[in-house]
Image (cartoon, rainbow, N blue to C red):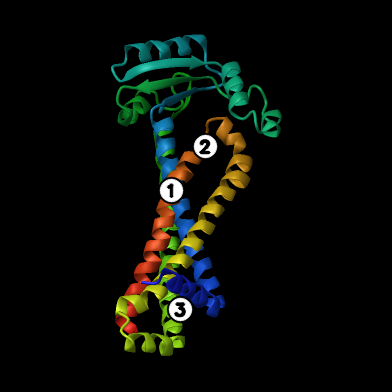
Amino acid sequence: MRVNFVLSEVATGLRRNLTMTVAMILTTAISLGLMGTGLLIAGMISDMKEIYYDKVQVSIFLADDVTEEQRTAIQSRLEDSDEVKTFIYESKDEAYERFQQQFSQQPELVENTPADALPESFRVELINPERYEVIKAEFPAGAEGVDQVRDEGDFLDRLFSLLNGARNATIAVAVVQALAALLLISNTIQLAAFNRRNETNIMRLVGASRWYTQLPFILEAAVAGLIGALLAIGGLVLTKVLFVDRTLAGPIKAGIIPPVDWSAIAFIAPVIAAAGVGLAGIAAYVTLRLYVRL
């Protein structure tokens, strides 16, 4: 098989249908970029679960007019409870200090929050976090100096449900875009084969195998898929540099959300490249076998 001939045919085919080739590359890049984004979001969600669920606490916020006697009674009941693993008391000053540390990258928010705006509280770690209702029933709001009892796990469940929804929506759009890319690849290959039907017919008459005549078309699609994959990887790199590392720098430094490491992109990049080349090549091969007689 003459490699130079096949490569020249690939280059010629890409140039002949330039507009459709560009459309095919861009559609593939968008679908693969969305797929990569979905994978990165899934990784971030996994990291966030490890960060937050290991630190899930029940917060017992005390009323502003709580007395020392009520505070001591609450502490004694927590010490005697079989549901409590550990607990700490946090005064208003300590709560405000922690608030300043968490939002140090947002000075305007800190400046506009009064020092006494945050209530004192007991932060309780349960032996079984799912037994939150027991603690809530034992310390009802409005009784014995208790303002409210809040389960951080309930908030985290809602947060991760929202994030999972965003991930699923991103992947769903990626699937739709991928289908559009596959249809566009199929149409492009059919058009390319029709435009070069005289050349391929002559090749078959002089003894060229069907595989030999189909290979340039398959490689055209694979090259377009590879270029689309490279654009998608470049988009992920730019998103990390320009959006994640800059716009989200504050929450990342505060430990609110995990960073996106280069290792994650390095892991996803080969997956995107393989998907771009593989899907494009397979789509071209199936199209040639089903709709084009070479």
Position of the C terminus, as image quadrant, is: bottom left
Mark 3, residue position: 188
Determine the secondary structure under disc 2: loop
Circle on res. 112:
none
Mark 1, residue position: 268
First in residue order: circle 3 vs circle 1: 3
Give amino acid for label 3. Thr
Disc 2 residue crowd, few under 14, some 14–19, many 20+, Cα 10 Å:
some
Determine the secondary structure under disc 3: helix
Q: Nearer the viewer, mark 1 or mark 2?
A: 1
Determine the secondary structure under disc 1: helix
Q: CA distance from mark 1 to mark 2?
A: 15 Å
First in residue order: circle 2 vs circle 3: 3
Give coordinates of residue 68: x percent, y percent.
Answer: 51, 9
- The answer, for residue 61, to whether it is visible in the render is yes
Q: CA distance from mark 3 to mark 1?
A: 28 Å
Asked if residue 236 lies left or right of residue 143, the reply is: right
Q: Nearer the viewer, residue 271 or 181?
A: 271
First in residue order: circle 1 vs circle 2: 2
For image coordinates 33% across by 18% down, the residue present is 84
The answer to whether 37 is drawn above or below residue 150 in the figure is below
Circle on res. 259:
2
Q: Quadrant of residue 284?
A: bottom left
